[in-house]
Image: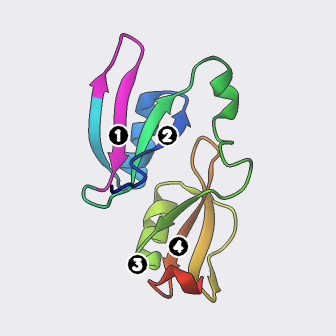
Amino acid sequence: MSKRLALVAILVPEYDAGIAFFVDTLGFDLLQDEPISAEKRWVRVGHAGSGTEFLLARAVGAQREAIGNQGGGRVWLFLETDDFARDYADMAAKGVFFEHAPRDEPYGTVVVFQDPFGNRWDLIQFTHTDRTHV
């Protein structure tokens, strides 16, 4: 039996705000946006064929307190790029908040950024495609 991580749910204050960031700012594809009820939608974003997708989950009630803190304040999302300079410049031009200047590490070039909801991410171009060397 084959298993894989199919979706990662990420809390957003509103669906359209999540779509705007993931699609317009990060360049993800809107894979699905279907109503489930009058208040709830099934919204998937990712890069078609990449195998990694996010389910944008509109936070309700007590969940709203967890928006932007699903990683407990640490970097918990890693956006890999094949062209760091290109994507860093594009994201900066779109107003993404970077916590520091890009830096070169033994494992690659990296910078920490925050999404508009407060989640901390790494934009990273790995030196090696074999993650066992990280």
Callout 4: few (<14), some (14-19), or many (20+) C-alpha neighbours within 10 Å?
many
Quadrant containing the N terminus is bottom left
Residue 44 badge? 1
Compared to residue 93, the image places residue 117 above or below, namely above
Determine if the magenta segment contains residue 60: no
Residue 17, position as x, y percentages in the image: 46, 34
Q: Earlier in the sequence, mark 2 or mark 4?
A: 2
- At 33% across and 18% down in the image, what residue appears? 36
- At 63% across and 17% down in the image, what residue appears? 61
Give the mark toward the camera: 2 or 3.
2
Give the mark toward the camera: 2 or 4.
2
Amino acid identity at mark 1: Arg
Callout 1: few (<14), some (14-19), or many (20+) C-alpha neighbours within 10 Å?
many
Q: Earlier in the sequence, mark 2 or mark 1?
A: 2
Residue 98, position as x, y percentages in the image: 63, 62
- At 48% across and 31% down in the image, what residue appears? 57
Q: Which residues are magenta?
A: 34-47
| SS type, badge 2 | strand
Give the mark toward the camera: 4 or 3.
4
Q: Earlier in the sequence, mark 4 or mark 1?
A: 1
| Label 4, label 1: how far apart the Cα atoms are | 23 Å
| SS type, badge 1 | strand
Count numbered badges in the picture. Answer: 4
Which residue is under mark 4? 124
Which residue is under mark 3? 83
Give the mark toward the camera: 4 or 1.
1
